[in-house]
Structure formats: structure tokens, C-alpha cells
Image (cartoon, grey):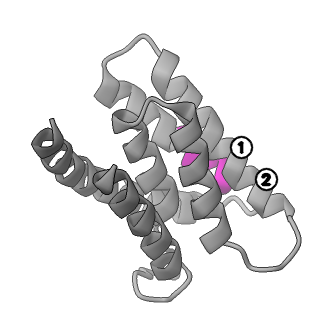
Amino acid sequence: MLIYIVNLIFVALAGLIQNTNLLVFEGVKPNLVLVLLLTLGFFYRNWFRRIIFILVGAFFLKFSPVIEVEDLFFITAVSAGLFFLDYLPWRKTISFTTVLVLATLILNLRAFSLFRFSVELLMNLGFAALFLLIFKWTHAKEK
């Protein structure tokens, strides 16, 4: 339970960091919360916990007090990504990479630019590899 609470705090911090210009490269930011939530989907199969993660992530990415289209895109992309992560028949890493590419594409549909999509995807894949290594190590200690 302690690791779950720490992961919730990690999602909140990722949302706060994503709202800054700390990780901007060529005018493009990685979607840390998306990557983090999909990565946590590897380790948490319980949908109640996943929904809590998604809601915390969406809350910390909020730009206005009302629900906007971007919020719905985010919630849909993460939920669909987690669903497909569970049911795609390939190896987990191939499924994860496919889901991350599709979720990044969904979130970039409103203002699609091939350059922006490519840069964001490369940053997302890099952070995904880092998060997978970190969580694999921390969750192995839990068992």
C-alpha cells in the first residue's frame, strides 16, 4: 500500500512538472503523466486503482475549472491504452510501445504536426524506458 501511495504522489508530481517549461525541447514537452500512467498499468491490474491514478493525473493536468475536450482526450487515451495493454496478444513490451504510440497520436490529433509528434514520441519512449526500469526495481522489492 505504501508503494501505491508513493506512486500516486509520483503521478501528482509528474502533472506538476508537466505544467512547467522544465522539460521543453524544441517547443515540445513530453507527456509525463500519460507515460507514467501507462507504465503503472504494467504493475497495477486492479481497475479501481488505475481509475484513481487516471483521476489524479487528470486533476493535476487541469487548466480550467470545467471539463474540456483535452481532458476527455487524455482520459480516453489513457483508459483505452490500459485496456489494450491488458488484452493485446503480443509481448508486453511490444504491446506497451504500440499503446504508447497510439495514445501519443490520439493526444496530438487536434493540432497534428509530424515534427511535434515525432519529438514528443521519442521523449515519451525515453521516459517510458526510465519509468519501467524504476518501477521494475521498486515493485520487485515489494514482493
Q: Is residue 63 magenta?
A: no
Is 135 displayed left or right of 62 in the figure? left
What secondary structure prevails in the magenta region?
A: helix
- In this view, the residue farthest toward the top is 89
Q: Quadrant of the C terminus?
A: top left
Q: Nearer the viewer, residue 107 or 141?
A: 141
Q: Residue at x 58, y 50 (%)?
A: 52
* Residue 38 placement (x, y as % from top left): 45, 44
Is 127 displayed left or right of 95 in the figure? left
Dot 1 corresponds to which residue? 76
* Region of the chain picked out in magenta, as a range: 102-107
- In this view, the residue farthest toward the bottom is 21
Residue type (three-letter) at the residue carrying disc 2:
Leu
- Disc 1/disc 2 C-alpha distance (Å): 6 Å
Dot 2 corresponds to which residue? 72
Residue 31 visible somewhere in the drawing: no
Residue 100 visible somewhere in the drawing: yes
